[in-house]
């Protein structure tokens, strides 16, 4: 069984009858969490389940807040980038608190490109599979609202190679990407890793240093037996 199928099966076997299932995928930038989340959503949709895919990228703070500690501040990235309270209050809490379905939730509240509020919504039914992905995801207040927690592990040298390709159009050159990540993003994520220890909180840990061959190295649901693709 490959990793995506394993995660889909984990959602199906642990979901409560008559309620949506919420799975969170966490990892550092470039770990492959977004790719995994999209593949999982596609797998669940192919099984004819309604799927709602949510990204923390749609829950940023305004630029004025994100930059208040300085444009290159690791602490600014760690604490002022993602509005996790809005993600919890507007997207996940309505699911957890609902006694009847369907229920309407927000799937985006802020456009980082326009630096302006948005109001994108989705209707969640009792059999919807909700997949949430992003950095800092295992922070409070989001953590208790996740039914299953997946951490995608990849070392920083590996992720740095990936983001040089992915983010070159944003920062102008591979060197500029490296400088930005070594100055701001990687130190900010190290703060999170030290404070939260997301691997310890995760139900499932996926080692994704080899993008073509991800490997499940921790599975709290089925002991510790590794499962690869």
Image (tube, rainbow, N blue to C red):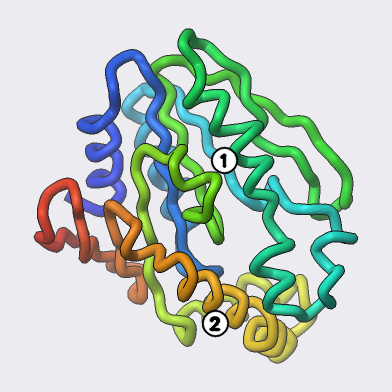
Residue 227, compared with residue 126, is above or below; it is below
Q: Position of residue 138 (x, y in %)?
A: 47, 54
Element under disc 1: strand
Q: Residues within 10 Å of mark 2 (few under 14, many from 20)?
A: many
In the picture provided, is 6 more to the left or to the right than 72? left
Q: Which residue is mark 1?
A: 54
Residue 179 relative to residue 209: left or right = right
Closer to the camera in the image, 100 or 140: 140
Instruction: Classify 10 Å Cα crowding around label 1: few (below 14), some (14-19), many (20 and above).
Output: many
Q: Position of residue 207 (x, y in %)?
A: 31, 69
The structure residue drawn at horizontal position 68% and vertical position 41%, both measured from the top left corner, is: 86
Label 2 sits on residue: 160
Residue 114 left/right relative to 192? right
CA gap between label 2 and label 1 equals 24 Å
At mark 2, the secondary structure is: helix
Residue placed most toward the observer, 169 or 201: 201
């Amino acid at each position: 069984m490959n990793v995506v199928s394993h995660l889909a099966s984990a959602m199906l076997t642990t979901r409560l009858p008559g309620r949506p299932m919420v799975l969170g995928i966490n990892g550092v930038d470039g770990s492959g969490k977004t790719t995994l989340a999209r593949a999982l959503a596609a797998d669940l949709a192919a099984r004819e389940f309604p799927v709602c895919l949510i990204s923390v990228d749609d829950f940023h703070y305004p630029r004025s807040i994100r930059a208040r500690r300085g444009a290159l501040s690791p602490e600014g990235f760690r604490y002022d980038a993602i509005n996790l309270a809005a993600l919890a209050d507007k997207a996940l809490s309505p699911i957890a608190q609902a006694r009847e379905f369907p229920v309407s939730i927000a799937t985006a509240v802020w456009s980082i490109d326009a630096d302006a509020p948005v109001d994108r919504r989705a209707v969640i039914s009792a059999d919807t599979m909700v997949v949430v992905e992003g950095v800092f995801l295992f922070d409070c207040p989001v953590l208790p609202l996740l039914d299953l927690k997946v951490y995608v592990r990849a070392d920083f040298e590996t992720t740095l190679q990936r983001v040089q390709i992915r983010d070159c159009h944003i920062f102008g050159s591979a060197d500029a990407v490296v400088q930005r990540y070594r100055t701001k993003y990687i130190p900010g994520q190290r703060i999170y890793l030290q404070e939260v220890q997301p691997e310890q909180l995760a139900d499932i840990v996926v080692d994704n240093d080899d993008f073509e061959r991800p490997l499940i190295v921790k599975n709290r649901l089925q002991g510790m037996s590794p499962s690869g693709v």
